[in-house]
Image: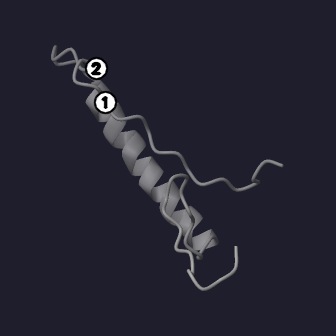
Amino acid sequence: MDDPDPRPIPPEKLLPGDCCDSGCARCVRDVYVDQRQAYKKALAAWQRRHPEPAVEPGDAVAVDPQSPA
């Protein structure tokens, strides 16, 4: 089942060759900054709706060594 309120996904980071350094009116760096700000705003709103800490894929999870497997 799909999560009806999934955690926002950050924008892809820029690669060194993404900007052509030609002084474009709307540089990919400007677009990235806008996307990053929108992501941070969406993430903050999502975290308010999900106050418990979310476990990210690959995060280490603490396991009590005394608990049975």
Q: Residues within 10 Å of mark 1 (few under 14, many from 20)?
A: few
Q: Is residue 29 left or right of residue 56?
A: left
- Is 25 placed above or below 43 here? above
Q: Going 51% across and 53% down the picture, which residue do you hit?
A: 58
Q: Is residue 14 left or right of residue 53?
A: left
Q: What residue type is disc 2 on?
A: Asp
Is 11 rendered above or below residue 61? above
Asked whether, in this view, residue 44 is left or right of residue 31, the answer is right
Q: Dot 2: within a 10 Å radius of its alpha carbon, few (fewer than 14), some, or many (20 or more) residues?
A: few
Picture coordinates of residue 41 (x, y %)? 46, 57
Task: Judge by depth and name the residue closer to the eye, 25 or 69.
Answer: 69
Q: Quadrant of residue 25?
A: top left
Q: Which mark is residue 4?
A: none
Residue at point 70%, 73% (across, down): 69
Q: Image quarter for residue 64?
A: bottom right
* On screen, residue 38 above or below 50: above
Give the residue at the far right of this rendering.
Answer: 1
Question: Does residue 48 sit above or below 8 in this rendering?
Answer: below
Q: Secondary structure at mark 2?
A: loop
Residue underneath mark 2 = 18
Residue 38 placement, left or right of 47 = left
Mark 1 lies on a secondary structure that is: loop
59 or 8, which is in the foreground?
59
Q: Circle 1 sits on which residue? A: 14
Total numbered badges shown on the rendered structure: 2
Question: At label 1, which amino acid type do we have?
Answer: Leu
| Camera-nearest residue between 63 and 48 | 63
Q: How is the image coloured?
A: one colour
- The residue sitting at 59% across, 54% down in the picture is 7
Distance from the alpha carbon under mark 2 to that under mark 1: 6 Å
Quick check: marks 2 and 1 in contact, CB under 8 Å?
yes
Q: Position of residue 40 (x, y in %)?
A: 43, 55
